[in-house]
Amino acid sequence: MQLLDTATVAPEHRVDAFRAAFDQASVPCRIEHLAPADRVHSRMHLWHFGDANLFTTDASGFRLVRTPRHLRMAGPEVVALAVQASGVGRFGQLETQSLVPAGQLMLSDLTAPYEFSWADTGGSRAFQIAYDRLALPPDVVRAAAPRLRGSPLHDLVRDHLVRLSRDAGRLSADPGATSLGTATIELVRALLVSAAGDDRHAAAVREETLLTRVLAYARAHLTEPDLTAPRLAAVHNVSVRQLYKVFAAAGLHLEQWLIVERLELARARLVSPTGRYRSVAAVARSCGFADPSHFSRRFRQEYGLTPREWRERSGPTP
């Protein structure tokens, strides 16, 4: 849902429109614009995923300041995990100051005072979760905040949030949006426990989030032919037997799931602007299929068309 596009707002009303949109999506704070009022520009969206939401902002320079006075105002107890999409953020909370370059994660505990800003133009993609839904105590969240980059899960969770934000409109409207939100919350929980190094919650969270972490890792590495059960088990420090057990409990068959995910990827690439110029075999290999003949057979079984027929029916061949 689009909250604001200042291109449709008269310059003299943009500061007020920015405030109104931000208040709708986040918690109370002071907003200081770093550009003249007539040069303020922003686009904001808020997408709902069950018990969590994704708040995206692209804007001219501004500073957010959340003070003890703001904490006394009524508002939800929320944690926000954000990807800096562009520009360099400057974040300060709980006596820690940090720069957040594009492509890195930043964790904000919105139950404590903080400052955040960027100069010139920047962008942020913030996944906001209520504390009671996150199911982690504040000390774990706050211990994790300055240590996110040290967790082996940092890149996995960042890439997941980037993909989520790229297609947030379609994904939030999908019947599976609530389940996707739940899976994203589980990934965030796993990241925070990992970064905090908290032994009290580590074992339970690792077990509860294992399937979600494996699926996210597998989707990020679908194009690699050596993505197999032994590799997935080794990466996640479990036995192959345990891995199969977790998949079976969810009603999934690991190898079949991998094939279907790769087929979906190949189906999209076959009709993409660049994929149309490649041979079917080349597309198959780029999606992790070592044997083009096997790929073609499985594609026809899944979709009732050969890869070439699918391409022809989906538009003109260049």
Image (cartoon, helix red, strand yellow):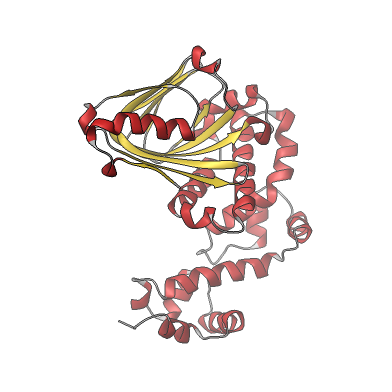
Q: Where does the C terminus fall, quadrant-wise?
A: bottom left
Is residue 123 rendered to the left or right of residue 38?
A: right
Picture quadrant of residue 174? bottom right
Residue 193 lies, in percent from the top left, at: 64, 33
Residue 138 lies, in percent from the top left, at: 63, 23
Q: Residue lying at the far top in this picture: please name it.
A: 69
- The residue nearer to you, when weighing 129 against 5, is 5
Does 116 sit above or below residue 68?
Answer: below
Residue in view at x 57 percent, y 67 percent: 261
Is residue 235 at all visible to an observer of this figure?
no
Does 160 sit above or below residue 122?
Answer: below
Does 217 sit above or below residue 89?
Answer: below
Is residue 111 at all visible to an observer of this figure?
yes
Is residue 104 rendered to the left or right of residue 41?
A: right
Is residue 269 rendered to the left or right of residue 53?
A: left
Is residue 271 rendered to the left or right of residue 225?
A: left
Residue 130 lies, in percent from the top left, at: 61, 33
Residue 2 lies, in percent from the top left, at: 41, 46
Picture quadrant of residue 89? top left
- The residue nearer to you, when weighing 248 against 112, is 112
Looking at the image, how many numbered discs can be counted on the residues? 0
Picture quadrant of residue 65? top left
Residue in view at x 56 percent, y 15 percent: 72
Residue in view at x 63 percent, y 50 percent: 178
- The residue nearer to you, when weighing 112 against 32, is 32
